[in-house]
Image (spheres, rainbow, N blue to C red):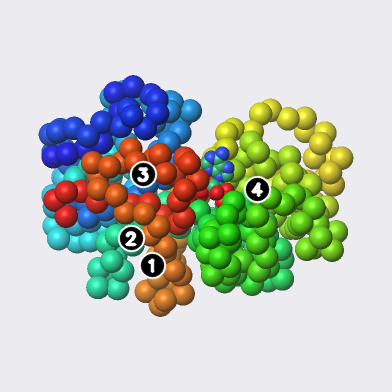
Amino acid sequence: MKAVRINEFGGPEVLSYEDVEVPEPGPGQARVRLAASGVNFIDVYQRTGVYPGDLPRTLGLEGAGEVDAVGEGVEDLSVGDYVAFAMAPGSYAEYAVVPAEKLVPFNVTLVEARVAAAIMLQGMTAHYLTHSTYPLEEGQTALVHAAAGGVGLLLCQIAKMKGARVIGTVSTEEKAALAREAGADEVILYTEQDFVEETNRITGGEGVHVVYDSVGKTTFDGSLDCLRTRGYMVLFGGSSGQVPPFDLQILNQKGGLFVTRPSLAQYTLTRDELMWRAESLFSWIGQGNLNVRIGGTYSLADTAQAHRDLEARKTTGKLILIPESE
Ligand code: NDP
């Protein structure tokens, strides 16, 4: 089968489209014939070595498709079932072997396989951020950076479902229009406007209850200045680079602020928690309440281009990869 592997850390050029053996499922695992794989920013951190890992290896943590073989002891899944997964390695390929406990069955007549591949990682992230890390309440205000990105568009929609007021930041007018469509009440072009001043103007100087910040290095300090007293700084990524160490006393000076740096794995600790988040997403999609924007579709052989576009801030919504065999 074909797979996209890295043999060294580096730029998009290290993504190598190779022939490898089709993997065999071991005990407790199933093999999925992938209809689509999701591209996520974490794949960039893994490719560059910001998040270290073994070499060589197949990249990709998310996908959806049909079960085509099951290993010993797997009772709840059968060949032909449609399943989706996130945070299981090796999805930039035609087939992936995944622990059965990470697989979420879905009804392919209600949700297309490509949409299922697009929603798992970014959707469950938007879910845990709004429901668990800082559970938004009706009438509260949230600042969402990179609001037209993969996580961003979902965060805007889910925050609105919870009755929050959403202020989004984006880099272009095209992205601003998408953020508004996703429900953002106010959109700031943070490449042209000072987002701290704008947020304070919009909130009448009060500040927001929570900032969901995935941009990191270039926004972190400003984000703290957008928070009201005892506000929550939820730093969940570093698209512009990692935030350097900082003086905790700043949290006191800026109003007794809270800071957390969460990851999806900490919020899908049990099968029940994983199913709660994934099934909520699938049911919202099935009912037409959550729109999943697939902003870019690439062939698996073109994975490097998908990475280039993502890192160059050219993309909106989700990027997916389709194997040649599909
Ligand atoms: P996005 O689609 O959001 O792409 C990244 C966006 O970040 C860009 O489109 C751009 O939007 C913005 N950005 C700002 N500065 C830069 C920069 N210097 N370089 C590149 N992009 C920049 O990606 P994802 O939705 O896949 O991921 C968003 C973030 O969320 C990532 O940081 C990722 O690591 C994090 N994440 C964290 C998870 C967790 O559990 N902790 C899980 C999933 C994602 P604009 O042009 O509008 O500024």
Disc marking residue 191: 4
Residue lying at 43% horizontally and 26% vertically, measured from the top left:
49
Secondary element under disc 1, as helix, strand or loop, is helix
Q: CA separation, marks 1 and 3?
A: 25 Å
Amino acid found under the numbered disc labelled 3: Ala
Kindly check if marks 2 and 1 are in contact, taking CB atoms under 8 A apart as contact: yes
Marks 2 and 3, Cα distance to the nearest angstrom?
Answer: 19 Å
| Three-letter code, disc 1 | Phe
**Looking at mark 1, is its residue's CB closer than 8 Å to ligand 1?**
no
Left/right of residue 162 with respect to residue 33 in the rendered view: right
Q: Nearer the viewer, mark 2 or mark 3?
A: 3
- The residue that label 2 is drawn on is 116
Separation (CA) of disc 1 from disc 4: 34 Å
Q: Badge 3 local density, few (<14 within 10 Å), some, or many (20+)? A: many
Left or right: 238, with 48 as reference point: right
* Residue 136 sits in quarter: bottom right
Q: In the image, residue 252 lies at what x, y percent? A: 84, 40
As shown in the figure, which amino acid type bears the numbered disc 2?
Ala
